[in-house]
Image: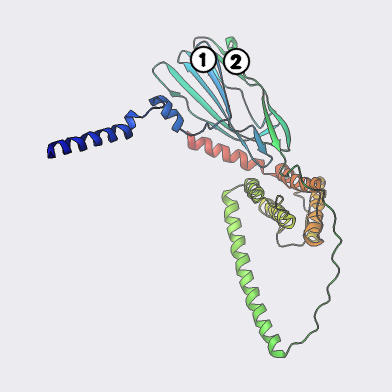
Amino acid sequence: MKTKLFFSIAVILACWLAAFSPGCKKGATGNEAAAGSGNKAEFTVDKLYERGPVQFRIKIDKTEITIAEKIRMVLESTSNKKYLTAFPELVGQLGQFSIAETEILPARAIDKDNIRMVQNYVLRPFLSGDYKIPPLTFKYWEENETEDNAHLIETEEISVKVKSLLPEDMEKLELKDMAGPVEPPAPNMTWIVLLGCGILAVAGGTTGLVIWLYKRRVRMITASYIPAHELAFRQLQALVDKKHIDNGEYKLFYDGVSDILRYYIENRFGLHAPESTTEEFLIDIKYSEELDARNKDLLKEFLKHCDLVKFAELIPTTAEIQRAFDLCKNFIEETQDRTSQIEDKDTEYEENR
């Protein structure tokens, strides 16, 4: 009787294990399961061009971005060792895009007969709209020939949509009247209260001065490691991520974009823009030789418009918000230190060697 009981229990356990064992489940094969468990494709566009013993590939990570975002583009060649390949020469601009970063990786062997070469690019748009990455031309030729005898492979044009930072369905905005003056309260304080307030004011002023000096030191240290224009672009991206415009927080958005431009001017030109009023700052730049007349006029227009939103309770229109952001972004683009970009690339090249 016990033997039959044990045998029955063993059969039940065997059936249960067979039913729930991973090796007995129905579904995808091993390769399909591996593919299904992987991450989504890193690139939205991945186009392969093949001719004879050579393959060229172009990959784009996104085809729809905002004006504060960037695009990553990868160019790749795979060829037999008996052939030489050449990538298109890309410097400064690619169609409507600015080339913000370039990385050329050393060639590596993928097997005994073939090698692979890769170049990475970061592209930055200037304004919203429909962009095009133009066709690119790759070359290849046999190692015992010259480049004059090279064969050509041309890629297709790729469309990219660059969206504005503002939502398309924003309600029509209206200008509010400026708030009238507020009468100060009648004085009603004793000399003891006045003395206490004086002590608090001195303590607060001292604390504020220490905090200001500390923040200034941090900004100077940060600016010594990061170019002023690159730091400003990072701050613009962080401001966009806060979605102030979507939430109707126009003052916060204008405070942010105004501060970013002021700190950029301080880091780039050494002018004490963050601590000055608009009128004081405009007087300072009037005699500055660092800025031309056009940039001075743009700054004047930008800062006066920001003051209307921050202090006069002006509710800006969609076009005004877009123009304020574009003025800030374009001013940084036009006045950035080109020399620092060249030095950074030279340093990176020497480190890679």
Q: Quadrant of residue 313?
A: bottom right
Residue, x 54% and y 15% (percent of image)? 50
In this rendering, the answer to whether 116 lies above or below 257 is above
| Label 2 sits on residue | 153
Residue 220 located left or right of residue 261? left
Q: Is residue 95 visible?
A: no
Q: Residues within 10 Å of mark 2 (few under 14, many from 20)?
A: some
In this rendering, the answer to whether 138 lies above or below 149 is below
Q: Amino acid at mark 2?
A: Ile
Residue, x 66% and y 40% (percent of image)? 338
Among all residues in the image, which is located at the extreme front? 1
Q: Is residue 296 visible?
A: yes
What is the number of the mark on residue 205?
none
The spot of residue 15 in percent (x, y) is: 27, 33
| Label 1 sits on residue | 54
- The image quadrant where one finds the N terminus is top left
Q: Which type of secondary structure does the marked residue at label 2 adopt? A: strand
The spot of residue 135 in percent (x, y) is: 66, 21
Q: Amino acid at mark 1?
A: Val
Q: Using the image as rendered, state which of residue 17 and residue 7 is in the foreground.
A: 7
Q: Which type of secondary structure does the marked residue at label 1 adopt? A: strand
Q: Say whether marks 1 and 2 touch (CB < 8 Å).
A: yes
Q: Gap between marks 1 and 2, in whole Å?
A: 10 Å
The spot of residue 52 in percent (x, y) is: 52, 10
